[in-house]
């Protein structure tokens, strides 16, 4: 590897580490990461841009004072549910009438599971002695940001399947009527890799069984087995079984599949 190629690789690694490395699809979906936290009729409007790195989440919260009063001791109070931890408490601010403020919050992630960030904005005004509270909409952290497709030998998959104690069993309930189309949809929706070779999926017998595998950024394994068959009414029936060493992945992945499987 030449010196120039080495420098380019180091620069790309730094961009990935700082969240600056964006694919075309990522840049096109930036707007999907802007979440409205309050209503348009609230005296304080807030929205957050969520940036997910491997081990932490950065919230860039824009707060707008929509009143004609100066807001004093304005504070963004956040709390977390799941394996998320707020790094530091944001400080208090004074916000002039119809002005805005950017507030940044850092949250550490310690395992792969769906987490929730919730909280409120608290402030004081000169015309009222009591503190005012605006409740924020919840921010749900997607498990798909932390798992990626991976491969493993069949023997290793079977050993992990027998060893892992957490299982989540999801009944198939979908509008898809073709087994392979349903499998492709689940693979795309869960960001997993199908370990079953295509040759084993060829043919039209009305039944399909496949194994999926993914690995998290924390080194956790996620195993999925799909068993579906076409019923007499043309609909698909069967079960999707998820196994992992931790409860968080099994439950979060099951919720994701339940939400996405209908198409």
Image (tube, grey):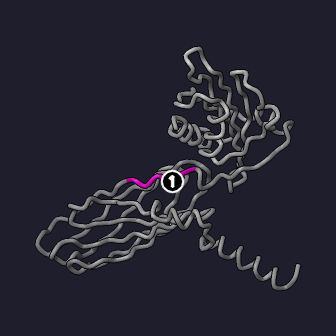
Magenta residues? 138-143
Q: Is residue 32 above or below residue 153?
A: below
Quadrant hosting residue 8 = bottom right
Front one among 78 and 173: 173
Q: Which residue extends farthest bottom?
A: 3
Residue 206 position, x and y percent, is 68, 21
| Local secondary structure at mark 1 | strand
Residue ID at (43%, 63%): 34
Q: Is residue 21 above or below residue 164?
A: below
Quadrant hosting residue 40 = bottom left
Q: Is residue 233 left or right of residue 130?
A: right
Q: Is residue 133 left or right of residue 90?
A: left
Tell me the residue that label 1 is attached to: 141
Q: Which residue extends farthest front?
A: 204
Residue 63 position, x and y percent, is 32, 71
Quadrant hosting residue 89 = bottom left
What is the quadrant of the N terminus in the image? bottom right
Does the magenta-highlighted stretch encompass residue 139? yes
Mark 1 Cα-neighbour bin, 10 Å: few <14, some 14–19, many ≥20: some
Residue ID at (62%, 43%): 249
Q: Which residue extends farthest right?
A: 1
Residue ID at (68%, 46%): 192
Residue 260 position, x and y percent, is 53, 40
Q: Is residue 129 above or below residue 232?
A: below
Front one among 168 and 207: 207
């Amino acid at each position: 590897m030449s010196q120039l190629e080495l420098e380019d690789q180091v620069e790309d690694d730094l961009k990935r580490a700082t969240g600056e490395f964006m694919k075309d699809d990522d840049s096109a979906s930036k707007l999907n990461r802007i979440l409205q936290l309050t209503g348009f009729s609230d005296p304080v409007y807030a929205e957050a841009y969520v940036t997910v790195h491997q081990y932490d989440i950065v919230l860039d919260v824009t707060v707008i004072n929509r009143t004609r009063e100066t807001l004093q001791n304005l504070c963004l109070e956040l709390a977390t549910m799941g394996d998320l931890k707020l790094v530091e408490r944001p400080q208090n601010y004074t916000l002039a009438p119809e002005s805005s403020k950017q507030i940044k919050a850092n949250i550490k992630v310690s395992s792969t599971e769906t987490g929730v960030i919730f909280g409120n904005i608290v402030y004081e005004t000169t015309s009222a002695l009591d503190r005012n509270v605006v409740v924020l909409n919840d921010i749900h952290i997607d498990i798909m940001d932390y798992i990626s497709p991976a491969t493993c030998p069949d023997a290793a998959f079977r050993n992990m399947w027998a060893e892992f104690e957490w299982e989540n069993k999801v009944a198939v309930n979908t509008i898809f009527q073709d087994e392979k189309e349903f499998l492709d949809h689940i693979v795309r929706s869960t960001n997993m890799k199908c370990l079953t070779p295509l040759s084993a999926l060829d043919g039209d017998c009305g039944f399909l069984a496949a194994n999926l595998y993914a690995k998290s950024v924390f080194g956790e394994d996620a195993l999925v087995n799909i068993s579906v068959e076409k019923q007499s009414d043309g609909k698909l029936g069967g079960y999707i079984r998820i196994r992992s060493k931790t409860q968080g992945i099994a439950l979060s992945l099951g919720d994701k599949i339940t939400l996405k499987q209908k198409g």
